[in-house]
Amino acid sequence: MQESRTRNFIGNAREALDDGNLQQALDKMKSGFVERRLEARARLPEFDDIRDQAREIKNHTLANLDYYLERFERKVTEEGGQVHWCATPEDARQAILKICRDLDAKTVTKGKSMIGEEIGLNDFFEENGIEPIETDLGEYIIQLRREAPSHIIAPAIHVLKHQVAEAFYETHDQFDPDRPLEEPRALLDEAREVLRQKFIDADVGITGANFLIAETGTSVIVTNEGNGDLTQTIPKAHVVIASLEKVVPTLEDATTISRVLARSATGQEYSVYTTFSTGPRRPEDPDGPEQYHVILLDNGRSKMVGSEYQEMLRCIRCGACLNHCPVYGSIGGHAYGWVYPGPMGSVLTPSLIGVDEAGHLPNASSFCGRCEEVCPMRIPLPKMMRHLREREFDGKTGPATMRTGIKMWAFYAKRPWLYHALAKLKFRVLGAFGRRKGRFRRLPGGAGWTAHRDFPAPQAGGTFQAQWSARGGKRSVDA
Amino acid sequence: MSESRPHVGLFVTCLVDLFRPSVGFAAVALLERAGCNVAVPAAQTCCGQPAFNSGDRADARAIAAQVIEAFDGFDYIVAPSGSCSGMLSKHYPELFADDPAMRARAEAFAARTHELISFLVDIRGMDAVEAHYDGRVAYHDSCSSLREMKVRAQPRALLDTVAGLAREELAFSETCCGFGGTFCVKYPDISNKMVGDKCDDIAATGADTVLAGDMGCLMNIAGKLKRRGSAIQARHVAEVLAGMTDTPAIGEPEG
Amino acid sequence: MSGRESILGAIRQGLGRGALGTAEKDALEDRIAGHARGIRPSRIDTADLKQMFVDYAAKVDVTVDRVASLDDVPDKVADYLAQENLPAELRVAPDPALDTVPWDKRPTLTVSKGASDGTHEVGLTAAFAGIAETGTLMMKSGPAHPTTLNFLPDTHLVVLRASQIVGSYEDAWDRLRAGEAMPRTVNFITGPSRTGDIEQTIFLGAHGPRRMHIVLVEDD
């Protein structure tokens, strides 16, 4: 499984905040996705009602997940394909390796897949002498830079165009080293030319899946570039890597969900390519893969069924929660330290790799609630992050000082008379000290606040409760 | 407005109680002008959010039960904060999911709970205030006001009736200021980036005053503005609507 | 225990039940067989789906020529290629639906038939359906419809008959189900290929076609 750097979240975030290139890239995403989603939503008055239906479809599917998975497998088999049930990333890697070895594969093209990241597939291929080629432009860029994706739908969103050019100059030594690569168009055309031949030469093509359809044994990919289609059409074998919650009952169910997918993700009415693949090529077909495999990955998801985190399995990976998250917008995706960044990652990552490893993630949220507001599947992300905090608090795995502080504060908050008596004293003193400047530049024990901000002093005259009772309470202030 | 004067229990909120009592008095004035009888139960401290959001459910429950008890018998419970009223009305019922009797009480309590400005406009029908404020103001939407309590148009509508006041809209008005309760001290660097961006957006409007309905955001924003040496003043929206702006703004020295 | 059994076992444990009984399975099969539709955009309740299709296609950078019959296709295709400064060489899907196109009307056009191996600059295919709600084409694979032609040529020309235009994706599924079994590939295509992966600026022609042009045959 992909290694995690999540324990060092605070340090990662610090680095991200100090990275000028990254901050420039993040600045560019402040408005684009958000505005385009709003416009797309405005153009479809039924949008929110369709979200409700999409949620119900996934809830129904999850309640019958075992049946729909078995049915999906049966249909894939009937159509001449094969489903490989993989409990762990290692099972998945081995199943994929066997398919590649049987075909004597040297190169593998890959469409964008977060499951590929989750199981660390590229490194594994390289260790086994197989060349993996990412074909989504963003994925290709970060593969050249030897980085992980920083966004689930826009993997290279942290990269500026001059950095893309650097990577191309360094890697594409078949071209004139003095060629101009300032313009994005030139970069795109160069990548297109290089990858075109890779598509044609590849032995195996790997894609992810946005949906698996139990009715027909079909896998579905939703893309804009067309790389996924070239990846799966030209090589001898098409291998789909998907986690088990991708299954839905019917083509109509996938269609309903697809109506909120692109609108939430990029603000498009529909993505350019929605491709439904069922089995290998038919005997009379002029093109298409000869083999069709589905790697069905669990990796901890079956244990989320029936738990407080089941709703997370509705996620369709649109990225809207990342696009609207102020924390993601401040630090980008790499700081989160594992495959899935942003709010969806802050719930999914602790569920998959453990709250001990990923305890920071559900805490690093201001609970602004925007993720839940924009989630097309209406996943209550803040509520689940709070559940994770409870698990941490009850399991005493979080920072002890925070725990002690909360307990101490709660002791007083539960005893109003003591609380008010102490507040009256303490805030009179604090108020008297702060009055001259109106604020504190430093406070004992308050460095978390005063490192970056002044701390406003309490108003003169004591607490509201003290003043109110001094006035006898219940007396009009206007009188 | 209705003939009988409803009994309103003011949930002061801990930040108003401790740091800015003038907001509490402004809230009382506005509620009385809206035809309410106002009382302030003494057995209130805090809404319990620090515990709730830190994963300390047991303490959050105990505090919630105490608040519900303290406000028994009021027609309405009103708080000058979207965050605290959101806790009272959206999260108390879920704290008692496994206790049907308390859950029912919490739901009835939640149904009577309102954020101050939306209460004035939506429930009491207030459409104008008699107040004067000389300044260009930018109104900051707190996340919980905006998303949990659906407060957006109401404060803007009332501010537009304040004599002498010019209102500017903030860019990225739906983006969090970075306060987030304990978040701002647990992750100060990230919080600082967020409040820094917010202060840039405030400054870009040309406003001399920033207003909001939540003391948490205001202390965060004021603290950052003052650290930067900005002259922009921060106040709770209730102070301006009540015409009670003779006190120094948040973080400003006395007289 | 195999991966399959352990995964299904864990799911059932989470759901607090064993494998479903016959009655429950039948209910799920009935749900599948029902092909129940969700909410569709009310905008498809219009008298003129053809115009809606053309309008939405235009929003995603597709150009459309309207012609009265297949006889007019060669002229429109030849003019389009000339106007776009493209070679007058066409790779055409071996589709019976296109057999009656009189290509010899424009002798400058060179026409070959079959799938693409990446050496063809211009491909021409017939669509299975046009979906008005987003200006989307539905293509299905088969002997007459090589999938490679939808993706490899730089320019994708499509012949669509007005009678093939439906309101929603669901209407298109119904038409597909009325025919033979599920093909290996069904492509919903909404405009030419594009990417926003470099600094979020949208450029056409990422890996698939750089441009898409539809000749709409008004047989309605």
Image (tube, helix red, strand yellow):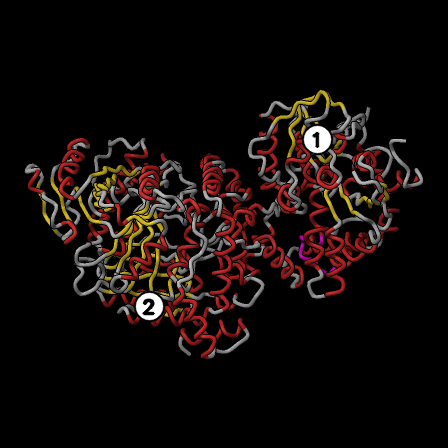
A414 versus C5 height, above or below:
above
Seen in the picture, residue C86 relative to A86 is either above or below; the reply is: above
Secondary structure under the numbered disc 2 in the rendered image: helix
Residue that mark 2 sits on: A95
Rendering quarter of residue A466: top right
What segment is highlighted magenta in the picture?
Answer: B51-58
Marks 2 and 1: in contact by CB < 8 Å? no
The chain containing the residue under callout 1 comes to B
Q: What element carries label 1?
A: helix
Q: Position of residue C167 (x, y in %)?
A: 35, 49
* Residue A167 at least partly seen: no
Q: What residue type is labelled 2?
A: Ala
Q: How far apart are marks 1 and 2 (CA)?
A: 65 Å
> Secondary structure of the magenta portion, mostly?
helix
The image shows residue A90 at horizontal and vertical percentages of 39, 66
Amino acid carrying mark 1 in the image: Leu
Residue in front for this viewpoint, C54 or B22: C54
Residue B127 bears which disc, if any?
A: none
Inspect the magenta stretch and tell me whether residue A156 lies in it: no
Return the residue at label 1. B158
